[in-house]
Amino acid sequence: MTSLKIIGTGRNLPARRVTNDDLATFLDTSDEWIVTRTGIRSRRVCTSETLTDLSVTAAEQALDKAGLKAQNIDLLLCSTIGGDFRTPSLACCVAERLGTGCPAFDLNAACAGFVYALDVANLYLTKPEIKNILIVSAEKMSTQIDWNDRSTCVLFGDGAAACVVTRGNALRYLHLHTKADVAPLYMPSGPGNSPFIEDKTPGGFLHMAGQDVFKFAVGVIEGEIKRALDTVRLPPEQVDYFLLHQANKRIIDFAIARVKQPPEKFPLNIDRTGNISSASIPLLLDEMLEEGKIKPGDTLFMAAFGAGLTAGSCVMIWE
């Protein structure tokens, strides 16, 4: 397959930090209850920021690190479960602010959206006129959840991350999977005010069957790791970092136990960010690059899972 490499990354989080103790002021919960079950201690939540605001800043950082201008981008792709508007897309809103002149559209694969976006970018790079692609993964989960439901609202946060990809030899493997099971994790859109729809049930918040999602997650992570490493004939000892979707620390702990690799190979930021859906992996990637932890030649395994039920994984040799 045509391969790609990432040449610039960026991220942006809202200013407001919400701790578990903050949540305990209006929910029947506690810091101990949340940390024990999820590993989350705080998350960032939008107050005055729009998702476009977060996305543009992350995108500008990625462009700057890539040494490119907005006008050098040939495709702008956003992974998100929903931007500031139902239409136009978040990608179009970001394109307007950046001043790009290229095609722009959104992709919704829930929390696996970043890996799905990499696959789409990889396919577009087969077109000779496409050289540089800007991927923005951005989520405003604070507007999607019921803040009276402690089983879901303690899990999520807001944020955006971005990367610029171009042709290269970094991507060695990419696999997408959809189980096609809606019931465990969904958010109804509602009927609007159409006089012709019989079901008048209004739109609502995110619904999650926690145990079902957990079982899917631990199974799919183990399966994706085995499939990827078997395909590229790579023992887990030769993987430098496993960048897993930051949904629940217990899921990552399960992966550590099954792969039998040091916990240091499984970086975390869920304690500070919560679950930011499709933005979690690229945000973690940018943090690690900024800290100098990822170096050329390092082998990275990335995997994510989300509503749908979707899953995706990839292997990169960092360039």
Image (tube, rainbow, N blue to C red):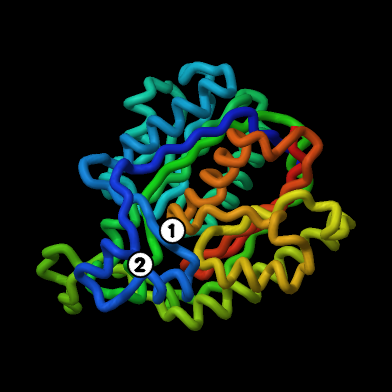
Q: Is residue 77 visible?
A: no
Q: Amino acid at mark 2?
A: Val
Q: Sequence order check: which comes first, mark 2 or mark 1?
A: 2
Residue at point 85%, 52% (across, down)? 238
Q: Of 241 and 225, which appears nearest the observer?
A: 241
**If the image is split into quadrants, where does the C terminus sit?**
top right
Please rate how many residues cluster around mark 2, counting C-alpha atoms within 10 Å: few if below 14, some from 14 to 19, many from 20. many
Q: Which residue is mark 1?
A: 274
Q: How many marks?
A: 2
Q: Of 260 and 194, which appears nearest the observer?
A: 260
Please rate how many residues cluster around mark 1, counting C-alpha atoms within 10 Å: few if below 14, some from 14 to 19, many from 20. many
Q: Residue 232, image x and y in percent?
A: 85, 54
Residue at point 53%, 77% (across, down)? 214
206 w.r.t. 107: above or below:
below
Q: Please give left or right for residue 25 compared with residue 283 in the image.
A: left
Label 2 to label 1: alpha-carbon separation? 8 Å
Q: Of 106 and 231, which appears nearest the observer?
A: 231
Q: Residue 21, image x and y in percent?
A: 30, 64
Q: Quadrant of residue 198?
A: bottom left
Q: Are marks 2 and 1 in contact (CB under 8 Å)?
A: yes
Q: Amino acid at mark 1?
A: Gly
211 w.r.t. 9: above or below:
below
**If the image is split into quadrants, where does the N terminus sit?**
top right
Residue at point 32%, 50% (across, down)? 17
Q: Residue 114, image x and y in percent?
A: 54, 49
Q: Which mark is residue 297?
A: none
Q: Please give left or right for residue 17 compared with residue 278 in the image.
A: left
Q: Residue 56, image x and y in percent?
A: 38, 31
Q: Quadrant of residue 194?
A: bottom left
Q: Which residue is mark 2?
A: 154
Q: Is residue 154 visible?
A: yes
Residue at point 29%, 61% (across, down)? 144
